[in-house]
Every structure is written in C-alpha cells, then in structure tokens.
Amino acid sequence: MNTLKRIDPRRPFTITAQGLKRITLGAIGALGGLDVADPLAVHASGGAHREAAKPRRTSTKPQRALLVAAHADRGALDDHARQTLAGAALIAAADTEVVLLVFGEFNDEANDNAAALGADKLIVLPAFESRAYAPLDELNALAACAAAYAPTHILLPDNATGDGDLGRRYAAAANASIATHVVELNAAHVAGYIRANTALAERALPDVILLAPNSVEPKLPFVGAGERVDWRFDERQRNEPHAIRDLGIEEIDAAQVALEEADFIVSAGNGVSDVPAFQRLAATLGAAIGASRVAVDDGRFTRDKQIGATGKTVDASVYIAFGISGAVQHLQGIKSCRHVIAVNLDASAPIAKRANLTVIGDAKEIIAALNEAALIARNARGTGAVLLKSTAVAEGALA
Amino acid sequence: MKIALLVSVGRHPVSGAARYSRNDAAALCIALSLAKTHRATLDVLHAGDASNPALHEYLALGAPVVEVLPLESACAQAEDQAAQQPAQQAAEQPGPAPADAAALLAARLRGYDLVLSGTRAEGAFDSGMLPYRVAQALDMPLVGAAVDLSVQDGCAQVRQFMPKGLRRRVEVRLPALIAVHPLANATPTYAYARMREGTIRARDDARAATALSSVPSSVSASVSPSVSPSGRAADDLAWTVRAGGAKPVRLVAAEKRSGHARMLSATTTESRGGSVVIEGSSVEKAQVILAYLREHQLVDY
C-alpha cells in the first residue's frame, strides 16, 4: 500500500489578503480568527486581489541600532544611498533599529519616504547644504549621533560626493575598524575586492562599512517605522573658524562634459527637425545634448551623442526627451536617469510609461516655448514674483 | 617650506607585477612643480620594502631620492598569523596599512608644512584610509580628491574633484595633508637617466623604532583610544582571501510573497508612468516642464 500522504486539491479554502488560501488539515495556527469568523468581510474589502500593504520589519522593542548616514541630493536620497539603507534594514536583527542620518534638506513627504526605504528613525540635519564643504562639522555631527545611539555598525555609501570621505574621517577619528568598497554584505560578513580588483576578501562586520554601488537590491518586502527625530546639532561649534575654507563650486560647461558624466541632458529623436533651435534650448538650459539612434542615423547628430544600447548609457538627474518614442534599446540607455521628461505627439508611446512627466504636443513648438520661458526665467532670476506666477499656471494646466 | 610626498607600489591588474601607482605619480608631478616654484625641499617617502624594483620608477618620474621606512617586523607578524594571505603587501601606502604604517609615517612626518599622498593604493586592500589615519595622527587638516594645487602665503588652494562635471575650490591653512585624485592635472614624464641618477635610501631600523615609540601619545588623542596600533594590525588580519573566481553575492530580500502575489506581479505591468499633460497651449506645456524642474530643484531659476 502507498504510504504517501495524499492531499485533496479541492480541500476547503479561505480568501485572505494574500489571496486564496487552502486550509491544510492538521496545520496549526494557519487560520486567523478573523478569516474563519467572517470570510465574506475580507472578500468585500477587496483584500483578495490587491497588493497588500507592506508589513513592518519588526515590532519588538529596539535594543541596538544600526546607523546609516548619507547626504541628500536635492531633497531626496539617490540610488546608492537607498541601497545602503536597504542593506542596513536587511541585515538588522529583530531587536535592532535602523537610524538614518541625512545631511541636507530631505523631503520626507514624498512617495518613497524614509519608512518605505527601511528606516526606523530619521534624523535630518538641513543645516548641511549638500554643495557646501564642511567635513569637520559633518564629522562632529556623525560622532554626536553615534554617541547618542551607540550603533553596532555605521553604514555609508562609498561615493565621491562626501559620504565616502565622511566615513573614512570618522573611522580615522574614532580609530574604528572599517571596510571600504564593500561589494558583498550580509548579516555575518562583508567582502570587497583587494589587490587591484583581482581577489575578493571577506571579514566579519567592522564598525564602519562603506558600500560600493549596486551591492544591495533596494526593493524591500517590509517598511520601517520612519519615526522622525528632532535633533539639534550644536550650532556653536559650526561658527568656529576652521583650517579649511570653502571657496565655492565651479561648473564645467555642460557641452564640454562627457555625456556619461552629464547631470542634465536634453535628447532629440525623430520628432525633432529643427536642430539649431534644439541646440539653442540646450545652451539655455545648460544641458548636454543626446540623441536617439534614428536621429543619429539620419545624420542630424554625431555618433558620440547616441544614447541607448548601441550608444552611451547615461545617469543624469534630468533627461528631457523630445520626439523620442522610447524603444527598449533607448530606455536601456536611460535606465539610471532620475527624472525623465518626455515630449511626444503619441501618448501611447513606450516612453510615456518610463517618464515621470509626459507632455503631449509638437516637439518643435514646445522647444521654442521652453527656450523662451527658460530665457525669461533666467534673466528674471532672483525676483520671486516670476516663480510664483509660473507655478500657478502650471498647476492650472495639470488640473 | 618642507613638502613630503607619500608614494606606494601598485600592482598591475592583469600580470600582478609591481609597478608605480599612477595616482602617486600625479602627486609627484604636483609636488615637484610646487617645490620648484616655492624653492621648497621635497622628501619622497615610502613605508615598506626597500628592495622593491617598482620604487626605481619614482626616480625615473623625477624624485631625486626615495626614502624607505622599513616595515619588516610588521610583515613577519602578518605572515605568521595569516598564512592564507600571501604577500601581505606591506609595501602599500594608501592601503589600510598593514600593521602601523600610518603611525610609522606620522612619526616621520612631523614638522612638514605640506604632506601629499595619493587617494587610494592599487594593489593591497586599497581602502584609501592611510591619508586619513596619518592626518589624524598628525592632527593636520586633510583635503581629499585634489586635482589642482597651489600654495600662497601659508594657505594651499585646492581644486577638488566632484562627479558630474563639478569641481570645488577649497582653501586650507598649512600645515595640511592633501590627497591627490587620480584624475589630477599632471602629466608624469619618465626618464631613464633620472632612474640611474637617483637613489633609494632605506632608513635604519633603530631610528625608525625610536620614532615609532613616540607616536602613541598623539594617536591616543582620538575619540576612542581603545584600539592600539597593534590592535589595528590584528584588524587587518581579520580579512581572509576567498578562492579565485568567487563572485560577490548581491544582498536581496528573501521572497516571502504567496504564489498568487508573485503571479500577479509577473502578469500585470507595473505602471510607473508619471503625470501626463495633454491639454493646453505649447507655452503652458513649457511652463509645466519648468515647474516640474523647479519642484524637484533641478534648476535654480
């Protein structure tokens, strides 16, 4: 006789937030009281076929802490900082809270706020402007925060915009153990390349961890508590004269910057016929020029301007696409762009799915209008009235 | 004015042969031109093995003398404790400094107005920590990622590298430690005659040892003096090298969704699309674009 346990595929079920749930006979605790009591109510609330809200990572009282520090870029965390935060949330034990320390303005009301990114506590220090250079003040703030929360580990993104420098400064000042350019992270160890990227070495988690980009998948199945903590950083220390003085930032002309390095790109596709007007717009906005494959093949732009699978891959903050439908190969090239604005005649073009803002209209007219508007705004810079007026118009158009 | 330059020995990424570090070569160029314009003395220092042939390349690149601070005791210790870690690369400068290269250098570097180094080594742990540890031990201000450097009445003007085509200008009061970026504006020139002419001078052990013993007083001024220099050496030994060809594993959250939820996310396309503007004249649409740019602080007008 066959001793295999047989399971009836048509055994009774309930409908839960996770979908159809079979009742396995003999299973203990599988049925919540609510499901049995009134399965209809769950069904009526539409819980069955809807993505449920993500659960909290932990509900136990925090005993220890992990500290993540990062500079905000224009009011938000960039991908690298998000990965670092997600990494901290993933390696945190149930009794560990993730404290996020943000230097600079941070817009927490946005769709992807600190809680959704995995932070349990959020400390924002808006006094540290992202473009100003104050390494010693930042070091003091980080040390003060570390002293207050006594984190087991401090995680930072290892980038060239201040975080990598801050982490190293902290490790040197606190005489802490550190792992830099970490490409593999988990709850037990970190690993990084050594000897000119020829070998991989690992060690137990050190005090300070500087993560290389793309070592963590930022998608999380849970959310953090996202509790905002008011933190007063002592202003007296900041007024002390330091040996280091910031003389300001120099910007290289956008047209000179390599396309891969550019922060602001305007790109033209088949829908752009008036190339000189397009180039004038790029000059007005101070943006680098890119093009789709069709525009390059037609000879309107040189080959080095091509963005996409066979051209260049860009990671600009702003990418404005004029008359580009958005073939898969092109979207591949702009995968890591933060804000994509599309101007296109066809509302169902694939780029509309990728773009954060899609404007349906003729590229030629909009290029001319945008050029004019940007010129006026540039010339009237500093007079607040212009800003207020234009926002009102924009809101009207959006509605 | 006294200028010191810290140089390291790099490693060819393919052949593994020892070679000069290009970052340090750029720093050497900058240091040479500074020494020339300000009639300063320039000392080129290396902590590690004096017999390394790659050090001669710094002579060819313009250094008249390379002074080597031996790290032998540290090397021996390292090899004892970590047999699986071949070639502890004690010669590296801006690496995470096996044993206490930072403390050794800091002891030697007292009294210099300007200390230059590369940002990151190319052959050891390459953590880029050495400038930070040395600056901390010397209690000097540190400016990193310098691409241009000039000195004027007691202050150094540094142009720093930043990504996305930005550069920042910073002024720092001397004495200071400045780490030079690999993309610095310098073109090293290599001359065989200079290599024959220059000398590699190893510092005798006794003097180095006495210098070292005077260091901990300054090191202990840091925030938490729990880790002694030898403790940090043990810290570097915490690393174990993996078998060749091992690939790093990306940290991904465990999938805990039900089969139904996974099926849903696989079959329905995630609508990422943002707002769509259809109505309005082209002028209004242009204003919408500008408003979007302003809202996200992408333009400053």
Image (cartoon, coloured by chain):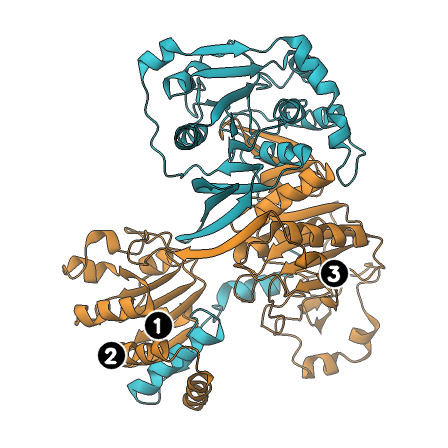
Chain colours: A orange, B cyan
Q: Is residue A346 above or below residue A241?
A: below
Secondary element type, mark 3? loop
Identify which amino acid the numbered label 3 is placed on: Asp
Query: Marks 2 and 1: same chain?
Result: yes
Give the left or right position of residue A399, taking residue B206 as reference: left
**Residues at marks 2 and 3, CA–CA distance in whole angstroms:** 50 Å
Label 2 secondary element: helix
Q: Which residue is mark 3?
A: A234
Say if B143 sits above or below A66 in the image.
above
Q: Which mark is residue A342?
A: 1
| Residue, disc 2 | A368
Look at the image and tell me in which quarter the N terminus of chain A lies.
top right
Tell me residue B231's x, y (percent).
Answer: 76, 26
The chain letter under disc 2 is A
Image side of residue B8 versus residue B286, left or right = right
Q: Which chain is disc 1 placed on?
A: A
Classify residue B255 by image quadrant: bottom right
Q: Chain of mark 3?
A: A
Q: Give the residue drawn at x 54%, y 58%.
A: A132
Same chain check for tags 2 and 3:
yes
Horizontal and vertical percent position of residue B109: 61, 26
| Pick the front one: A302 or B269 | A302
Mark 1, secondary structure of its residue: strand
Crowding around mark 2 (Cα neighbors within 10 Å: few <14, some 14 to 19, many 20+) is some
Q: Amino acid at mark 1?
A: Ala
Residue at (73, 68) in percent of width and height: A228
- From this viewpoint, is residue A263 visible? yes
Of pointers 2 and 3, the one earlier in the residue sequence? 3
Depth check: A290 or A252 in front?
A: A252
Question: The disc labelled 2 sits on which kind of residue?
Answer: Ala
Query: Answer yes or no: do the residues labelled 2 and 3 have beta carbons within 8 Å?
Result: no
- Look at the image and tell me in which quarter the C terminus of chain A lies: bottom left
